[in-house]
Amino acid sequence: MLADIFPLVALRLTTPRLELRLPAPEELAELGRLAANGVHDPAVMPFTVPWTDQPPADIARSVVQHHWLRLGDWSPEDWALNLAVFRDGTVVGQQSLSARDFAVTREVGTGSWLGKAHQGQGIGTEMRAAVLELAFTGLGAEEAVSAAFADNTASQTVSRELGYRADGTGRRVVRGALAIERRLRLTRADWLRHRRVRVGIDSLPPCLPLLGIAAAQTP
């Protein structure tokens, strides 16, 4: 079985409404089509790399290629787990958890997007809570970082609800113009105070070496 060679394909996160896991090939195609149908107001760009500034077919293809790329160059020292998010069996978005030298830093980063039809329903908070539970409870992370541009109020709202604190600003160029990035940081202690979502984690132990650790760490 593939899971015997690459156990991350069996990893599952569940919340009261959602399931997060690596997508099967046809589900990956569905994820690409979802992105092609729109994930944000075209007048603004929430991403540092403006990958949504392409024709729909190219957006869909870029989702598929990026997914394969990150799996193909996976290493325990540098990884990005790009999980498809399902609600009632339907793909609604993508939630990522990433780290470099996690065995030493115990720090993870997150990123996400949702199809426009699924926004404004609290899904963004629930799916980020799922990967934070994986990070802090399953992997023994000490801190998680995130960032959002000043006009991305939805992402900043999610971060506040989950206990992140301001961690400085950065100056970026997006679409040829200055964009102010607000960095955020979440400590283990703040996560334990703010976690409200019930999260199930299945088939994690075989994945741990691929994530840079030898055994699960719990608070």
Image (cartoon, rainbow, N blue to C red):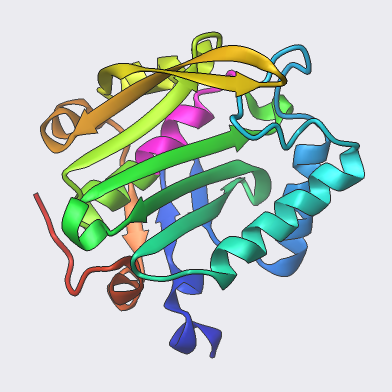
What is the quadrant of the N terminus in the image?
Answer: bottom right
Q: Residue at x 17, y 71 (%)?
A: 215
Q: Quadrant of residue 120?
A: top right
22 shown above or below 187: below
**Front in this rendered view, residue 164 or 55:** 55
Q: Main secondary structure of the magenta part?
A: helix
Give the side of residue 92 with respect to residue 135, left or right.
right
196 shown above or below 161: below
193 shown above or below 74: above
Give the side of residue 45 with respect to residue 2, left or right.
right
Q: How many marks?
A: 0
Asked if residue 122 lies in the magenta stretch, the reply is yes
Residue 119: x %, y % from top left: 62, 23
Q: Quadrant of residue 146?
A: top left
Query: Does any portion of residue 140 appear in the rendered image?
Result: no
Residue 148: x %, y % from top left: 48, 21
Magenta span: 120-130
**Front in this rendered view, residue 180 or 110:** 180
Query: Does any portion of residue 213 appear in the rendered image?
Result: yes
Q: Residue at x 20, y 51 (%)?
A: 106
Residue 41: x %, y % from top left: 74, 16
Give the side of residue 162 with respect to residue 86, left or right.
left
**Front in this rendered view, residue 201 or 162:** 162
Asked if residue 113 lies in the magenta stretch, the reply is no
Residue 95: x %, y % from top left: 51, 44
Q: Quadrant of residue 102?
A: bottom left
